[in-house]
Amino acid sequence: MNDIRKERLILSTSTVAFLVFYHGIHETSLLDVSVATMLFMSCFAVFDRIELINLIIVEYWIIMIIQFVFLMRSTETDLSPFNIVKIVFHIGTVMMLYIFTRMTISTRIVEREA
């Protein structure tokens, strides 16, 4: 990878990571952060860099831990079974996309080397 492409990759990754983190750090963004992370992960899958996808999922879990702290401190949050299922669904969807993205990138790398 040439230097200019590497610089663009680092700049775009850090910019989008900051935007997802900034969006997810608010108390009202519990379910929105999953959608933002999935868009982030899908877009960056084209770079065929598994370490980027790993970085994205680490950021997602950091944001989710912050969101759970907000959730436990909040008195306004309704933790009905329906809302718990929505949270689990969003986490499961992000993790499935993470697994499929890793598999896709690994397959492309192996096919390119063959």
Image (cartoon, rainbow, N blue to C red):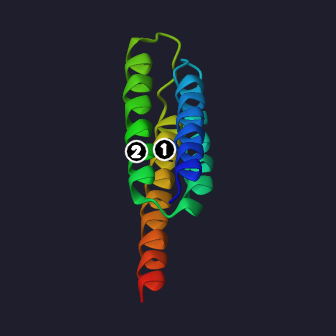
Q: Residue furthest front?
A: 3
Label 2 crowding class (10 Å Cα cut-off): few <14, some 14-19, many 20+?
few
Closest to the observer, 5 or 33: 5
Classify residue 36 as left or right of residue 101: right
As helix, strand or loop, the secondary structure at mark 2 comes to helix
- Mark 2 vs mark 1: give the one in front: 2
Closest to the observer, 31 or 110: 110
Q: Would you say residue 86 is visible in this rendering?
A: yes
Instruction: Please name the amino acid that badge 2 sits on.
Output: Leu
Q: Are marks 2 and 1 in contact (CB under 8 Å)?
A: no
Residue 93 place in picture, x, y as percent: 51, 54
Give the residue drawn at x 54%, y 27%.
24
Give the residue drawn at x 38%, y 31%.
62
Residue 23 circle label: none
Asked if residue 105 is positioned above or below residue 56 in the image, the reply reads: below
Residue 31 place in picture, x, y as percent: 57, 35
Classify residue 57 as left or right of residue 78: left
Instruction: Please name the amino acid that badge 1 sits on.
Output: Val
Give the residue drawn at x 50%, y 64%.
48
Asked if residue 22 is positioned above or below residue 110 in the image, the reply reads: above
Which is nearer the N-term, disc 2 or disc 1? 2
Q: Would you say residue 31 is visible in this rendering?
A: no
What's the distance in space between the residues labelled 2 and 1, CA to CA?
26 Å
Label 1 crowding class (10 Å Cα cut-off): few <14, some 14-19, many 20+?
few
Which residue is labeled 1 in the image? 85
As helix, strand or loop, the secondary structure at mark 1 comes to helix
Residue 55 circle label: 2
Residue 98 place in picture, x, y as percent: 45, 57
